[in-house]
C-alpha cells in the first residue's frame, strides 16, 4: 500500500472539494460541466443530485479549473428576510473580490463597477450592500457584473448553490432578477445546484416561478458504485498512511451505499478521530436525524413523522399508509393529504420515486423518529 507520510487530509477532507486532485472520479461530470460553462449558447446549467453526492464539490472544482472568475452564492439557510438575502449577496461578492485579487485588472474593473452602484460599499475585500431604503436592485448588481464581463471578454459564471432554499416573496424578487439575467445578460452563465427534485420543481417547474420554462442543460451527481466506494476508501486511507482491515472497509461500503459525503465522513472520522464504523455510523444517523427534524419543524410534524417511520419500516402501499395514519389520528385521511406528504418528501429528496428513503443512513435516521 502506498503511504504518503505527514500528509494533510485530502480525499477525506470534509469541506467541499475545490481542486481536481482532491476530487475522486467524476471525470465525465466535470468535463461536461466545463464544456457547458465554456459554450456560449448555454445560459443555464443545473447541477443536481441527492444530498451529499458532491454537487458543490463538482461545481467548485469545475469552476476552479477555469482561468476566469466566477461568483458563488452559497444559500446555506432558507432566506427569510431581505437583510438575509442582501447579506448573502454581500458575502458572495466579498468572496469573489478576495478570491480573484490576483487576477488584477479584471477584478479592479468589477470592483469599480460594483462600487458605482448605489447602496454598495467596498472596504478592502468586504462588500456591504445596503438592504434598506437605498438598496440596489439585484438586477442592477447583475447588470454591472455582466457589463464588466462583456468588456473584459469573459463569461462570468454565477452559481446559486442550493437554489431551492430561496423561496417565498424574497425568492420571487431574486428569481425575477435571475430570469432577467437569463433573458438579457449574455455574459453571465447561470449555474444552479440543488437537491434532485426540489430545484427543478420549485425554481424551474413551477408556472408561478419567474424561471419557469427557461431552457437548461444539466449535470447530475450520482452514487458511487460498490467498487468505486471501495476504491475511494482505500485511496483515502492510503493517502493518510492508515491501514484499515478489509472487512471493516467492506462493512463501511455496504452501509454507506455509495454516497460520497457519507464515505468522506466515515474516512475522516476514522482517520482523524480513530473511531470505529459503528460509532461513526451512529453519529451520521444523528446528523441525518437532525436534518429530518429540520424538515419536520416546518410541517404538520406528527403526520410526517408517522409517514416517515412507516416508509422506513418498508410500508409503502398507499392503503397501508392511510390506515396507519387514520389509526394514529383517529380520523379519516384523504388521498390528497397522503399525496401532498409524499410529494414533499420527494421534493426534499428524502424519498425516491419508489418511496424508498434515498440512502440507508437516512432510512436508519427515519426509524429513530
Ligand atoms: N468526488 C469527490 N471526491 C472526494 N470527496 C468528495 C467528492 N464529492 C464530494 N466529496 C465530499 O463529500 C462531502 C459532500 O460533498 P458536497 O458538499 O460537495 O456535496 P453536496 O451534494 O453539495 O452536498 P449537500 O447536499 O449537503 O449540499 C464533502 O465532505 C466533500 O468533501
Ligand atoms: Mg452542496
Image (cartoon, rainbow, N blue to C red):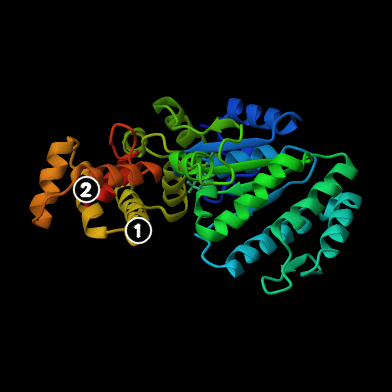
Q: Is residue 53 toward the left or the right of residue 83 in the image?
A: left
* Residue visible at 89% across and 54% down in the picture: 109
Asked if the beta carbon under badge 2 is closer than 8 A to the nearest atom of ligand 1, the reply is no
Position in image of residue 23 (x %, y %)? 59, 37
Position in image of residue 248 (x %, y %)? 33, 38
Q: Is residue 149 toward the left or the right of residue 239 in the image?
A: right
Q: Residues within 10 Å of mark 2 (few under 14, many from 20)?
A: many
Which image quadrant is residue 17 in?
Answer: top right
* Residue that numbered label 1 is attached to: 290
* Most foreground residue, 90 or 138: 138
Note whether 330 is above or below 225 in the view shown. below
Residue 307 disc label: 2
Position in image of residue 107 (x %, y %)? 85, 53
* Most foreground residue, 180 or 261: 180
Q: Circles 1 and 2: CB distance less than 8 Å?
A: no
Which image quadrant is residue 128 in?
Answer: bottom right
Q: Is residue 151 toward the left or the right of residue 246 in the image?
A: right
* Residue visible at 73% across and 28% down in the picture: 41
Q: Secondary structure at mark 2?
A: helix
Q: Residues within 10 Å of mark 1 (few under 14, many from 20)?
A: few
Q: CA distance from mark 1 to mark 2?
A: 17 Å
Position in image of residue 187 (x %, y %)? 79, 40
* Residue visible at 63% across and 61% down in the picture: 88
If you read the primary sequence from the N terminus, does the residue marked by circle 1 or circle 2 appear first?
A: 1
Between label 1 and label 2, give the one nearer the viewer.
Answer: 2
Q: Secondary structure at mark 1?
A: helix
* Residue visible at 59% across and 25% down in the picture: 28
Q: Dividing the image into 4 quarters, which one contains the C terminus? A: bottom left
Q: Is residue 355 toward the left or the right of residue 64 in the image?
A: left
Amino acid at each position: 500500500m502506498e503511504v504518503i507520510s505527514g500528509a494533510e487530509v485530502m480525499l477525506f477532507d470534509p469541506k467541499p472539494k475545490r481542486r481536481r486532485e482532491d476530487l475522486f472520479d467524476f471525470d465525465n461530470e466535470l468535463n461536461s460541466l466545463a464544456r457547458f460553462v465554456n459554450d456560449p449558447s448555454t445560459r443555464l446549467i443545473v447541477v443536481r443530485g441527492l444530498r451529499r453526492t458532491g454537487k458543490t464539490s463538482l461545481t467548485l472544482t469545475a469552476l476552479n479549473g477555469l482561468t476566469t472568475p466566477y461568483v458563488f452564492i452559497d444559500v446555506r439557510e432558507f432566506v427569510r428576510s431581505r437583510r438575509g438575502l442582501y447579506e448573502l449577496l454581500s458575502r458572495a461578492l466579498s468572496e469573489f473580490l478576495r478570491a480573484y485579487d490576483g487576477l488584477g485588472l479584471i477584478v479592479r474593473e468589477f470592483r469599480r463597477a460594483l462600487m458605482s452602484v448605489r447602496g454598495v460599499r467596498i472596504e478592502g475585500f468586504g462588500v456591504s450592500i445596503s438592504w434598506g431604503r437605498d438598496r440596489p436592485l439585484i438586477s442592477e448588481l447583475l447588470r454591472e457584473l455582466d457589463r464588466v464581463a462583456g468588456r473584459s471578454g469573459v463569461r462570468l459564471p454565477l452559481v446559486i448553490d442550493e437554489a431551492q432554499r430561496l423561496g417565498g416573496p424574497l425568492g420571487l424578487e431574486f428569481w425575477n432578477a435571475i430570469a432577467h439575467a437569463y433573458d438579457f445578460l449574455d455574459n453571465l452563465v447561470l449555474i444552479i445546484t440543488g437537491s434532485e427534485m426540489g430545484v427543478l420543481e420549485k425554481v424551474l417547474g413551477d408556472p408561478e416561478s419567474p424561471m419557469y420554462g427557461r431552457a437548461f442543460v444539466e449535470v447530475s451527481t450520482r452514487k458511487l458504485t460498490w467498487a468505486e466506494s471501495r476504491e475511494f476508501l482505500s485511496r483515502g486511507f492510503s493517502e493518510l498512511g492508515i491501514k484499515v482491515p478489509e472487512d471493516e472497509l467492506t462493512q463501511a461500503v455496504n452501509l454507506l451505499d455509495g454516497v460520497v459525503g457519507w464515505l468522506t465522513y466515515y474516512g475522516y472520522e476514522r482517520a482523524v478521530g480513530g473511531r470505529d464504523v459503528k460509532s461513526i455510523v451512529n453519529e451520521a444517523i444523528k446528523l441525518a436525524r437532525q436534518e429530518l427534524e429540520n424538515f419536520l419543524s416546518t410541517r404538520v410534524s406528527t403526520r410526517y413523522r408517522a409517514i416517515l417511520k412507516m416508509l422506513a419500516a418498508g410500508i409503502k402501499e398507499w392503503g397501508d399508509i392511510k390506515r396507519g395514519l387514520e389509526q394514529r389520528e383517529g380520523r379519516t385521511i384523504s388521498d390528497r393529504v397522503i399525496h401532498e406528504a409524499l410529494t414533499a418528501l420527494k421534493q426534499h429528496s428524502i424519498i425516491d420515486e419508489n418511496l424508498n428513503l434515498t440512502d440507508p443512513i437516512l432510512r436508519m435516521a427515519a426509524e429513530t423518529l
